[in-house]
Image (cartoon, helix red, strand yellow):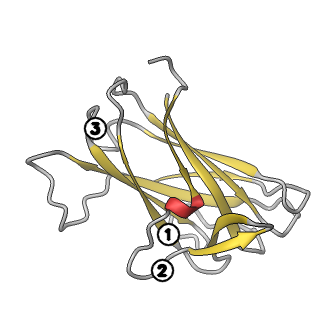
Amino acid sequence: MASGESLAMWSAAAGIPPTTGYATLDVRNEHVVLDFDKDTNESAYFAGVLPRNYEGGDLVFRVEFMTSTTSGNGVVWAATLERHQPGVDDFDANNFGTTVTGSANESTTSGVASVATLTISAAQAGTPEPGESFRLKLIRDASGAFVGGDNCLSDAELISIELREA
């Protein structure tokens, strides 16, 4: 597989809510989005299977989102990956790896998407293998739990996530 090729993609509708503190489904001009609150850390899970052409490299998540503010203060995202090794990992227990962060300023035009890039090294993800299932947890760091929080004054509306191999 060539570096930078897509391994998986999710729309906002594929988001799986955790028990508490979850992003909420919404619609913006007939586009499904996940709203991540401006004041509280909210999250969503995205499930997938690493394709057979994955070569063990670092994982790059491209997070596409919009906001209704146009001040350009920045949205901070945090992500962590849970590897599901057959015969080893217990699905009844959370086993997420290292949390990484990435940010992007919101567009200066309401309704125009921005993209934040987050890279999880293969080691931080537990060294996943091709064909293994996994779960991505995406969090908006509104409260500063990870890197000081963001300064965007509105919800961050997730459009999609693309997973690439670095």
Marks 3/1 in contact by CB < 8 Å: the verdict is no
Is the residue 85 above or below the residue 131 in the image?
below
Residue type at numbered disc 3: Pro
- Residue 93, horizontal then vertical, whole percent: 19, 66
Residue 86 is left or right of residue 73, and the answer is: left
Q: Is residue 60 left or right of residue 70?
A: left
- Three-letter amino acid code at disc 1? Ser
Which residue corresponds to the image point at 40% horizontal and 37% vertical from the top-left?
Answer: 121
Mark 3 / mark 1, whichever is N-terminal:
1
**Residue that badge 3 annotates:** 128
In percent of width and height, residue 70 lies at: 88, 63
Closer to the chain start, of discs 2 and 3, is 2
Given residues 47 and 148, the one toward you in this image is: 47
Residue indicated by mark 1: 43
Residue at 14% over, 59% down: 90
Q: Is label 2 in contact with label 3 (beta carbons under 8 Å)?
A: no
Residue 21 image label: 2
Mark pair 2, 3: CA separation: 27 Å
